[in-house]
């Protein structure tokens, strides 16, 4: 499913127009980004938790040349599914 199909599905389930559904989805995505930029986490009970994790610097290997490379530390976005969501996909 892509973004346009998701907007259509939201519109159908919520009884909203496609334009309102797109605004709501865009607002949700922007809010998640803002929360993660602030190094906070967003918990939606039953659905899941969006959070930020830090990966430490490490050594890696370039697969095409075999040379060792240095991979810098960075922050990544994580999502952990909640119990209801996990049970729904079983």
Image (cartoon, grey):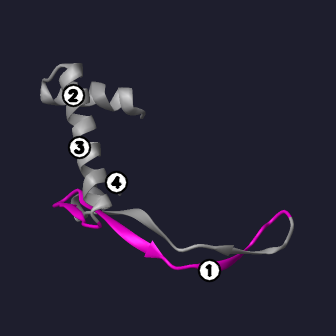
Q: Residue at x 35, y 67 (%)?
A: 52
Upstream in sequence: badge 4 or badge 3: 3
* Residue 1 to residue 61: above or below: above
On the image, the x and y values in percent for residue 46 come to 18, 59
Residue 15: quarter of image:
top left
**x%, y% of residue 41?**
24, 65
Q: Which residue is mark 1?
A: 58
Mark sitting on residue 28: 3
Q: Nearer the viewer, residue 33 or 21?
A: 33
Q: Is residue 87 visible from the viewing direction of this image?
A: no
Q: Residue at x 59, y 73 (%)?
A: 72
As measured in the structure, the alpha-carbon distance from the residue carrying label 4 to the one carrying label 2 is: 24 Å
Question: Could you tell me which quadrant the N terminus lies in?
Answer: top left
Q: Could you tell me which secondary element the residue under label 1 belongs to?
A: strand
Q: Say which label, 4 or 2, has the lower sequence index.
A: 2
Asked whether residue 22 appears in the rendered view, the answer is yes
Quickly name the residue at label 4. 89
Give me the disc on residue 21. Answer: 2
Local crowd size for mark 2, using a 10 Å CA cut-off: few (<14), some (14–19), many (≥20): many
Q: Which residues are magenta?
A: 39-64
**Separation of disc 3 and disc 1 at Cα?**
34 Å
Q: Point out residue 89 in the picture as x, y percentages from the top left corner.
A: 34, 54
Q: Which mark is residue 20?
A: none
Up the image or down, 11 lies above or below 68; here it is: above
Image position of 45 (left or right of 39): left
């Amino acid at each position: 499913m892509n973004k346009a199909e998701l907007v259509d599905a939201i519109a159908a389930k919520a009884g909203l127009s496609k334009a309102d559904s797109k605004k709501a989805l865009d607002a949700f995505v922007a809010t998640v980004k803002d929360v993660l930029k602030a190094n906070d986490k967003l918990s939606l009970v039953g659905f899941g938790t969006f959070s930020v994790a830090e990966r430490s610097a490490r050594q890696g290997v370039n697969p095409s040349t075999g040379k060792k490379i240095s991979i810098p530390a960075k922050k990544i976005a994580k999502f952990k599914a909640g119990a209801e969501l996990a049970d729904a996909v079983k």
